[in-house]
Image (cartoon, grey):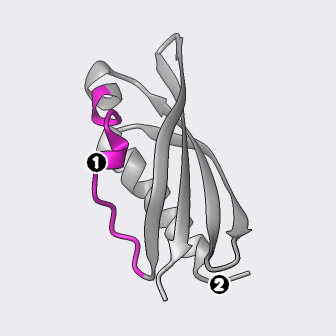
């Protein structure tokens, strides 16, 4: 496993929380590899408290995220559940190491 995974994982989680003004309440990563690439799958759960924060998370695949040494290959808003005080949002991403 690459030692760079935690840095990319933490950077992306922080960027998502900052972008939406939300609280990152859960995150995990799983190393991933194909025949030609190495990287990680990332899972984030955010507590988004207002509509502006929720709107900021639309079109994630069109946004640029600075992840030195990695390329963001895929990112999706996988789930959104309304709850008292905001919404619980699940974001999943795939990063690959930039050789």
Q: Is residue 51 above or below residue 58?
A: above
Q: Which residue is mark 1?
A: 62
Mark carried by residue 17: none
- Quadrant of the image occupied by residue 3: bottom right
Q: Earlier in the sequence, mark 1 or mark 2?
A: 2
Q: Is residue 45 left or right of residue 29?
A: left
User: Residue placed at 61% from the left, 55% from the top?
Assistant: 42
Residue projecting furthest to the front: 35
Query: Element at badge 2?
Result: loop
User: Nearest the camera: 75 or 55?
Assistant: 75
Q: Position of residue 65 (x, y in %)?
A: 33, 61
Which range of residues does the magenta coloring cover? 55-68
Main SS type for the magenta part? Answer: loop
How far apart marks 1 and 2 lie (CA) works out to: 27 Å
Left or right relative to 94: residue 59: left
Residue placed under numbered mark 2 in the picture: 3
Q: Name the residue located 48 percent from the left edge and 20 percent from the top edge.
A: 87
């Amino acid at each position: 496993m690459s030692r760079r995974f935690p840095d990319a994982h933490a950077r992306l989680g922080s960027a998502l929380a900052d972008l939406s003004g939300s609280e990152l309440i859960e995150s995990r990563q799983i190393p991933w590899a194909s025949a030609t690439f190495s990287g990680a799958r990332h899972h984030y759960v955010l507590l988004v408290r207002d509509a502006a924060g929720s709107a900021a998370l639309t079109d994630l695949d069109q946004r640029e995220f600075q992840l030195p040494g990695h390329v963001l290959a895929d990112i999706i808003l996988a789930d959104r559940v309304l709850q008292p005080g905001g919404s619980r949002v699940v974001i999943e991403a795939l990063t690959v190491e930039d050789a």
